[in-house]
Image: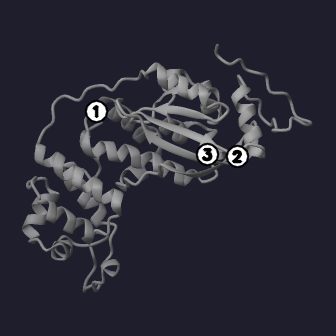
């Protein structure tokens, strides 16, 4: 699939230009205190001349930015564009990264990131049990996990290890839509992480293969990919409707692992003594969690016990 389709918007240009064009289409004149004007707008959002005026640059200069003809905007221009587009902090940082990448020009051949993790990371995952935890790559491939970190994603263990990717799971696995209480928010966060990577490393093989697959197989992914959202979530709470242990709301924390190729550790937790904690104990011990098992086990099929690694 062509890079233009992966990038969105078509017509070539730079990731900086495509991002500006996508975000301009999402800001209305009313959002920034401008009148709607006379006549039918050909495209949604602000016109180029309106955004250029708000940012204090000429229409010609801004047009060249969108078309990839101008690749060295000053920090003050980038910040002015971010303010005019009403970008939040994470989006503003992403715009700055895109501007820096545009100024550097064509990058060298991208390298494939490592899928391996240091032995110490494996010890950390083991020590966190029964809390579910896993390590994901920059494209959210599952590269290491403890039992709960795998079984929390109902049905993911049925896939071969090389196919286990959190983005692929949430869009393509039939269990995912029912598992997450707020599935739409979940998929938005996944796409935002990939969009952030696409802005600074658009030709990376691990990214392009995954994006091409999902653009082909998932209309929901294609819809969100065109939005250029880049705001992910690193902590908070998620509610699951798990077929093996029922409903549970867990806290989660995602953190970057230093010294890796963009790997992140994602961990889920619950207060000891709560029903959620009891459910996590079951998931931690289960080799293949049986549907409809409850934390108490009363009146439900038993969950086969697992074995902790020695």
| Residue 157: x %, y % from top left | 61, 26
**Cβ–Cβ under 8 Å for marks 2 and 3:** no
Of the two numbered discs 2 and 3 on the same chain, state the one appearing first in sequence: 3
| Residue 237: x %, y % from top left | 60, 52
Q: Image check: 206 left or right of 140? A: left
The foreground one among 123 and 307 is 123
Which dot, 1 or 3, sits closer to the camera? 1
Of the two numbered discs 1 and 3 on the same chain, state the one appearing first in sequence: 3
Q: Quadrant of residue 275?
A: top right
Location of residue 118 with respect to 77 vertically, above or below:
above
| Residue 100: x %, y % from top left | 17, 49
Location of residue 161 with respect to 169 vertically, above or below:
above
Q: Circle 2 sits in a helix, a strand or a loop, which is it?
A: loop
- Residue 271, labelled with which disc? 2
**Cβ–Cβ under 8 Å for marks 1 and 3:** no
State the residue at coordinates (54%, 36%).
169
- Residue 173, labelled with which disc? none
State the residue at coordinates (11%, 60%).
74
Number of other residues with Cα within 10 Å of mark 1, as a class: few under 14, some 14 to 19, many 20 or more: some
| Residue 92: x %, y % from top left | 29, 59
- Residue 177, labelled with which disc? 3
The foreground one among 129 and 161 is 129
Query: Alpha carbon of mark 2 to alpha carbon of mark 3: how far?
Result: 26 Å
Number of other residues with Cα within 10 Å of mark 3, as a class: few under 14, some 14 to 19, many 20 or more: some
Quadrant housing the C terminus: top right
Number of other residues with Cα within 10 Å of mark 2, as a class: few under 14, some 14 to 19, many 20 or more: few
Q: Which residue is mark 1?
A: 204
Q: Circle 3 sits in a helix, a strand or a loop, which is it?
A: helix
Query: Alpha carbon of mark 2 to alpha carbon of mark 1: how far?
Result: 40 Å
Quadrant housing the N terminus: top left
């Amino acid at each position: 699939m062509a890079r233009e389709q992966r990038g969105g918007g078509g017509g070539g240009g730079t990731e900086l230009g495509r991002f500006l064009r996508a975000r301009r289409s999402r800001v209305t004149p009313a959002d920034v205190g401008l009148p709607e004007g006379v006549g039918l707008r050909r495209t949604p959002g602000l016109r180029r001349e309106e955004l250029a005026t708000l940012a204090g640059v000429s229409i010609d200069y801004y047009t060249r930015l969108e078309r990839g003809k101008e690749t060295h905007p000053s920090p003050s221009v980038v910040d002015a564009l971010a303010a005019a587009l009403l970008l939040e902090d994470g989006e503003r940082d992403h715009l700055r990264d895109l501007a820096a990448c545009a100024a550097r020009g064509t990058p060298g051949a991208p390298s494939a990131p490592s899928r391996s993790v240091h032995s110490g990371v494996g010890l950390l995952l083991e020590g966190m049990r029964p809390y579910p935890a896993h390590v994901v790559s920059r494209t959210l491939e599952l590269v290491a996990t403890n039992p709960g970190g795998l079984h929390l994603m109902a049905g993911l263990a049925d896939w071969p290890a090389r196919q286990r990717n959190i983005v692929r799971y949430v869009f393509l696995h039939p269990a995912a839509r029912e598992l997450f209480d707020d599935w739409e928010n979940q998929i938005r966060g996944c796409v935002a992480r990939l969009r952030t990577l696409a802005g600074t490393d658009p030709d990376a093989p691990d990214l392009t293969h995954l994006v091409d697959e999902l653009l082909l197989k998932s209309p929901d992914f294609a819809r969100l990919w065109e939005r250029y959202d880049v705001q992910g979530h690193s902590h908070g709470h998620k509610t699951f409707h798990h077929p093996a242990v029922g409903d549970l709301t867990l806290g989660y924390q995602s953190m970057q692992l230093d010294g890796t190729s963009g790997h992140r550790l994602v961990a889920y937790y619950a207060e000891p003594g709560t029903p959620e904690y009891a459910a996590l104990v079951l998931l931690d011990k289960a080799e293949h969690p049986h549907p409809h098992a409850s934390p108490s086990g009363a009146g439900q099929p038993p969950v086969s016990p697992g074995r902790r690694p020695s």
